């Protein structure tokens, strides 16, 4: 049985890993399921990403997700390749059923779309801002 969590409404990253999870979005209705798949030799657990009858190719790394307060976008660490297991920072658009990987991996602490934040010694800093030029891939 999956552990059911509510994503923080302020966009802060919530940890998950090593078993099945379901996260409810800020509206309390939207749902992202993260069934556990396996653990690689080194690293966090790997999970499928299921939402609205869709499944992303690849895996989410079991290290956490951040759900934007607007309820539309979900950020997580992602591996598009089930064999190579690279680690990317990706954002899922639940409305358009598409996702986008950022140009570089970020250990993101919070998502408040269009801004992705990282923790610093002085608090938080914006590490990436979506401009509309990103390449989104269909998840449907």
Image (cartoon, rainbow, N blue to C red):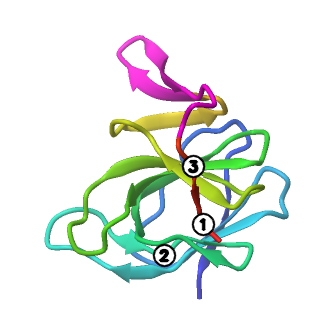
Q: Residue at x 71, y 79 (%)?
A: 53
Residue drawn at (43%, 39%) of the image = 102
**Magenta highlight on residue 120:** yes
Q: Nearer the viewer, residue 38 or 90?
A: 90
Mark 1 and mark 3 in contact (Cβ < 8 Å)?
A: no
Q: Residue at x 65, y 29 (%)?
A: 114
Disc 3: which residue: 136
Image coordinates for residue 84, horizontal then vertical, percent: 20, 67
Q: Residue 39, percent across and down?
A: 27, 76
Element on which disc 1 rests: loop
Quadrant of the rendering where the N terminus is positioned: bottom right
Task: Specify whether 44 is left or right of 138.
Answer: left
Query: Could you tell me residue 107's position as x and y percent?
Result: 37, 38
Circle 1 residue: 139
49 or 29: which is nearer to us? 49
Instruction: Provide the secondary structure element on which disc 2 rests.
Output: loop
Q: CA distance from mark 2 to mark 3?
A: 19 Å
Residue that sits furthest to the bottom in the current view? 1
The residue sitting at the top extreme is 122
């Amino acid at each position: 049985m999956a552990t059911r969590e509510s994503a923080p409404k302020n966009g802060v990253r919530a940890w998950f890993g090593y078993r099945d999870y379901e996260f409810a979005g800020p509206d309390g209705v939207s749902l992202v399921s993260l069934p556990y798949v396996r653990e690689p030799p080194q690293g966090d657990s790997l999970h499928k990403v299921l939402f609205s009858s869709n499944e992303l190719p690849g895996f989410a790394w079991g290290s956490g997700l951040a759900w934007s307060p607007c309820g539309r976008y979900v950020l997580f660490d992602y591996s598009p390749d089930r064999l190579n297991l690279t680690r990317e920072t990706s954002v899922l658009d639940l409305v358009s059923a598409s996702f986008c990987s950022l140009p570089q991996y970020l250990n993101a602490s919070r998502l408040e779309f269009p801004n992705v934040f990282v923790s610093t010694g002085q608090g938080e800093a914006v590490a990436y801002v979506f401009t509309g030029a990103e390449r989104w891939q269909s998840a449907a």
